[in-house]
């Protein structure tokens, strides 16, 4: 197997790779200047880095993007845009299937609940967050004090700057930074291709390479009902990425576990991942069977179904990495090296020597609350938009009646506006789909908590999960946004007095859910933060460098090269072409998901078929990076990342570059598709600066 | 919800329903004459019952069927036949997709490993089996003694009669019967329709009604290379079933749990079913992703994938029943009534009073071995044909070197011939498919046993599950039947000395697998048998009747009425028509799995569209009954059962007839399809006796 090969190589030359590898999801406040200079002979000119930072945006539904014109045009992946595309669609008007193309600004479609964030500044607030925790405090006290400090810091910053202000935990607790964002909440859909080409090859081709996907969509941000005026946007390089060249990506990797101890990785492998994978498969099968009943069902479930399938494939890849003894051997060797250094110095041992044991103790606590927290606090037992809204309204009322410092993090003053945008979203909620999801998740809750659990008996009240779900969804008024707003205005009293059955369920569940959360925060999260803070500091002292922190869905820079790779003894070319898509379709008898959309079949003759379509590079990246711009030395847009190959899935735990690659849509392929297939002259003009 | 309604009705009038219901999977040695007489005014004439018995056959891959002509013609469901159809198919010649039609006897396709059993006689051997177990024996001793008695009884019977002889455990241990079968092992495929019409509506319509499926196929049994001469076969009634009439089915229901105690049902609900459902979903997702990669992959996996999807839907229905408090309330009431009667008599209490506690103790033991036994002994951790063959060869060598009485049940002398037919089957084994399945199941094994389990470390030997699976499948020679036969001839010594990596894995795993099996048989199965024997006897004494035993994949008779039902306030007609299939396809935009095969589209004008296609009846039935003939008072074939509706899935635990229905293909619809679409004149002639 190919996986094994690169691991052997890796074990043999770890040191060499660490020195020369394109590894790292670097902070913009601490960019990899040495790597760029020494490996690529590149020193970014003054303002280069800031321009890239200010051209990058975060999508609050979990992706990245970048500005593409002075008139607020934003480019991202189709699979990042699909949440909004789905919400703009209705029965009989399925923009996911047909694509969307606003021929004029008045046709641009306003997303009901999309928020884009532009990172404006970074401030190190480690000292203040750490100082809040008194020496000798219990973990419960420490969690409370740290939360208070973070809530307060954010509120102060918001009051002072008017900007969205988030305290971010870096190095798993080693550092705390305050990130300030400009928010865009009026975001309108400009262009999306058909899913059949955006996600050509579907789940079978997901995380594979070669690929042929136009996984791209365009939005425009508005301010005061006019296109926002954007100073920093990326110039579109019509030629796109070239083989061998240095490319950088600027985006928001969601989460990695590279600093985790071996015991922690084993916990993920043996306990967390199996639970998650069973859940993902359960949801996938449920949504697929729902989808197959009718075309309209399929339309309603498609975005969520994709998300489960995507996660399932990603988790399987991650789990394969953790189940590979060669990977674990490598991680163990790294850990042993650090531990030996720490233990060989009395000072280091005194300061950090107990960190590994602290992690293990926290993992034991995690194991105890893993499933209950997932079911009750993460709503795995109540898989329903309506329940989520009810929970949100209830907690909004309860938390906002407390001083800001004491609130749950997501109800702190600084985030309320964004939260309300979600809670009062006009996005459609389908009763039949809700019933199916809630019914199955209540059944799971019953299985996992036990049929005689007090909460189950009270929630079901003698009904089966199916009956209970049907009655809840039929009986609630929470699909009406006006009803939600009235409840929110009425506060805790109105909510407590409400006869709405889903509100009643949220009231019933919340004490247990909060208790599970409290146990997790006090016995798992805070102890892990403390232990990892020690390990981070130990690394700083032993290795003499901070390196880069694990991913946190905040802006990072990664360095790489456009580069082919070998698989099963075969060179896989750095790029595919538009023409290759037609061959790939034919090789699969043009059957779904390998059927090209009618417009592509009809328009083939107009396309330059040798135009690059997708390409690979060594840029370190994970989920959340979807939609990140790929830029060249000139800071020009040469592509947009949308995936990684199967070998890259282990990047959650360890970076390798022998076979693992990030996969991007090529800037030239995008332009060619827009021009020849979609005849999107205005959009092409705006991107290339022609005709403006 | 509809489910709730009928349960309420049921709770209110249990007594009435028990008296008048069509409940029961009756033994042919104890048919429901009273029910037939009192409810339907029908007394089967002399020989009627024996003729039906001798016209019925069992498919060893898990279904039922019946003789349809004097020349050995057998009719069953397409989904029972599909195992053989799949094995006769090759790359580029997919009979599942295209259907199969032998226009002459020489074109009939011989199945590589199909065996049909015709029940010849039934003998009560309870006394001998029970006498073998000494008073005061430990459960380990009891298990051994009982097994020896059963193996010996079977061998004696085989030697005496030359017939396949199986000792069957009835009433969960209350009775033991010796069933003697005539075997047919030369079974040839005569006719199968396209899967698109056999399983029209696919997984979405599975267990639903109305339905439009030609779920039927024909085989012919041969003896000495000539069509077998059959005395007892069912006359085909060309008009088929009529609304309201009494119908009987004769088939092999696989398994029910109606006599289980409440604690036992709770165990299934809380422990066994969740494990099984997670496994089924895991396999379903795995096989689906494999299938989607290419048309050929889909062909290879289709029969297995269907089987997982079918089981998943069935288990979900069963689980919904157990998770319905109304169902459990009913079961609890039944149990309490029996327990009260037992406890109120000193004699009964002394004899049977501890049975419920014995069941609970056995369930605790079951819980301890549930997962390990499934992984190791039921091969859930080694999902591979090749591993199954290796295990079979190893145990064949080990067990046949022991005296017959001491062998594991399936290696007892009486069953060896049938076993070898499986082991030396020429059915194709695909390396890529094997690798994917084995890799995922090894990964599951690692998750469930723990990565540091000795067995895992030895089996993987430093490789990842994926690498290990690839090396095993590439390295083995077990795909060659000649190699298997040589190993079998060489016995235990040749197997022990074999360098084959899959044989080596079987050798490694077997001690632990046998230990898990032993624990299950001694601590779970035997104690449950003893406890349920008490409960069965208690029921006989208290209720004054044996009733019918839980299903055991042996021949049973069930009584019912062709009858419509109400769902969501709507009458659902007793039958659908051939024309309805076209409307159903249109309502789903003719998209898979609602696309009719080309032959049906083209041949529509030739069909009498108002011919009945599928119909429902109240006949008590479960999985294993698939392919059972439906006969009228004259003992004529009027239809063939192929499914039950969603409401019938609770029949595993409790019979109800308000909404639950068995679903059959109508005899007239079959004939009309054969005539008008397939122009199968010879087959129609043979069925109707015309032109013979």
Image: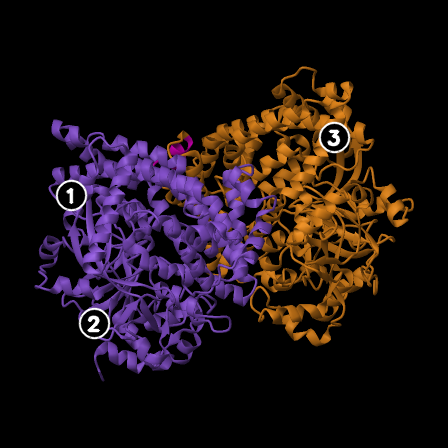
Chain colours: A orange, B purple
Residue drawn 34% across and 53% down? B646
Give percent across and percent down for residue A443.
Answer: 42, 42
Closer to the eye: label 2 or 1: 1
Mark 3, other Cα within 10 Å: few <14 / some 14–19 / many ≥20: some
Q: Mark 1 vs mark 3: give the one in front.
A: 1
CA distance separating discs 1 and 3: 71 Å
Can see residue A432?
A: no
Q: Would you name the residue on which mark 2 appears?
A: B230
Quarter of the rendering containing residue B67: bottom left
Q: Are marks 2 and 1 in contact (CB under 8 Å)?
A: no
- Residue that mark 3 sits on: A338
Q: Residue A425: give x, y in percent of width and height.
A: 59, 45
> Which contiguous range is marked in magenta?
A455-462
| Horizontal and vertical percent position of residue B56 | 22, 64
Tag 1 and tag 3, C-beta contact below 8 Å: no
Q: Mark 2, residues whose alpha carbon is within 10 Å: few (<14), some, or many (≥20)? A: some
For residue A277, what is the image quadrant?
Answer: top right
Q: CA separation, marks 2 and 1?
A: 35 Å
Residue A460 lies within the magenta run? yes
A94 lies above or below A307: below
Q: Residue tagged by mark 1?
A: B127
Q: Is residue B330 left or right of residue A283?
A: left
Answer few, some or many: residues within 10 Å of disc 1's Cα (few below 14, many 20 plus, some between 14 and 19).
few
| Magenta stretch: dominant secondary structure | helix
Disc number placed over residue A412 in the picture, else none: none
Give the chain letter at badge 3: A
Whether discs 1 and 3 lie on one chain: the answer is: no
What chain letter is assigned to the residue under label 1? B
Along the viewing direction, whichever of A671 and A367 lies nearer the viewer: A367
Given contact means CB atoms under 8 Å apart, are the residues at marks 2 and 3 in contact? no
- Based on the displayed image, in which of its 4 quarters is residue B218 positioned? bottom left
Q: Disc 2: which chain?
A: B
């Amino acid at each position: 197997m190919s996986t094994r090969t690169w691991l052997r190589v890796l074990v043999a030359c770890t040191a060499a790779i660490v020195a020369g590898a394109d590894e790292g999801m670097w902070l913009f406040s601490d960019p990899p200047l040495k790597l760029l200079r020494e490996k690529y002979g590149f020193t970014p000119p003054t303002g280069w880095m800031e321009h890239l930072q200010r051209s990058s945006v975060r999508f609050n539904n979990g992706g990245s993007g970048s500005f593409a014109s002075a008139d607020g045009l934003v480019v991202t992946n189709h699979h990042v845009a699909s949440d909004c595309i789905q919400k703009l669609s209705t029965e009989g008007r399925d923009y996911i299937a047909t694509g969307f193309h606003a021929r004029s600004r008045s046709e641009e479609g306003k997303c009901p609940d999309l928020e884009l964030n532009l990172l404006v500044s970074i401030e190190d607030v480690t000292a203040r967050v750490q100082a809040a925790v008194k020496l000798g405090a219990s973990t419960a006290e420490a969690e409370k004090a740290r939360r208070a400090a973070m809530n307060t810091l954010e509120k102060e910053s918001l009051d002072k700057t008017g900007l969205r202000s988030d305290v971010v935990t870096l190095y798993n607790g080693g550092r705390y930074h305050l990130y300030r964002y400009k928010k865009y909440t009026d975001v309108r859909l400009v262009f999306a291709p058909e899913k059949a080409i955006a996600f050509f090859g579907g789940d079978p081709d997901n995380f594979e390479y070669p690929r042929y996907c136009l996984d791209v969509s365009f939005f425009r941000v508005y301010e005061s009902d006019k296109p926002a005026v954007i100073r920093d946007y990326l110039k579109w390089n019509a030629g796109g990425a070239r083989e061998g060249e240095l490319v950088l990506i600027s985006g928001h990797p969601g989460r990695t576990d590279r600093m985790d101890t071996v015991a922690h990785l084993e916990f993920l492998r043996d306990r967390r991942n199996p639970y998650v994978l069973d859940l993902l498969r359960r949801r996938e099968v449920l949504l697929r069977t729902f989808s197959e009943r009718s075309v309209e069902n399929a339309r309603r479930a498609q975005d969520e179904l994709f998300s489960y399938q995507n996660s399932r494939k990603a988790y399987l890849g991650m789990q394969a990495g953790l189940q590979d003894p060669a990977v674990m051997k490598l991680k163990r060797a790294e850990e042993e090296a650090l531990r030996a250094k720490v233990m060989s110095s009395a000072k280091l041992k005194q300061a950090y020597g107990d960190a590994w044991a602290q992690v293990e103790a926290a993992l034991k606590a995690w194991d105890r609350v893993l499933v209950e927290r997932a079911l009750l606090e993460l709503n795995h037992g109540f898989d329903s938009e309506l329940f989520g809204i009810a929970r949100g309204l209830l907690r909004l009322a309860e938390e906002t009646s407390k001083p800001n410092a004491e609130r749950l993090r997501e109800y702190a003053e600084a985030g309320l506006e964004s939260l309300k945008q979600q809670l009062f979203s006009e996005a459609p909620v389908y009763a039949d789909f809700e019933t199916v999801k809630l019914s199955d998740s209540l059944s799971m809750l019953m299985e996992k908590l036990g049929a005689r659990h007090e909460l189950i008996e009270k929630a079901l009240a003698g009904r089966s999960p199916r009956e209970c779900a049907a009655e809840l969804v039929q009986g609630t008024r929470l699909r009406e946004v006006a009803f939600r707003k009235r409840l929110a205005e009425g506060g805790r009293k109105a909510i407590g007095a409400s006869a709405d059955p889903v509100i009643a369920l949220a009231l019933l569940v919340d004490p247990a859910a909060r208790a599970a959360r409290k146990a997790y925060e006090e016995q798992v999260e805070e102890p892990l933060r403390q232990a990892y803070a020690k390990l981070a500091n130990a690394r700083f002292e032993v290795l003499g460098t901070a390196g880069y922190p694990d991913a946190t869905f905040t802006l990072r820079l990664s360095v790489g090269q456009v580069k082919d790779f070998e698989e099963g003894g075969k060179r896989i070319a750095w790029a595919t072409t538009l023409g290759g898509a037609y061959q790939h379709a034919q090789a699969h008898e043009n059957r779904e998901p390998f059927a090209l959309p009618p417009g592509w079949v009809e328009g083939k003759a107009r396309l330059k078929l040798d135009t690059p379509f997708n390409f690979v590079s060594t840029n370190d990246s994970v989920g959340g990076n979807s939609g990140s711009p790929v830029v060249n030395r000139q800071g020009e847009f040469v592509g947009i990342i949308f995936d990684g190959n199967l070998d890259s899935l282990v990047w959650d735990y360890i970076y390798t570059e022998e076979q693992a690659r990030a996969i991007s849509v090529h800037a030239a392929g995008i332009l060619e598709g827009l021009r020849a297939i979609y005849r999107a002259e205005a959009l092409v003009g705006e991107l290339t600066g022609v005709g403006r």
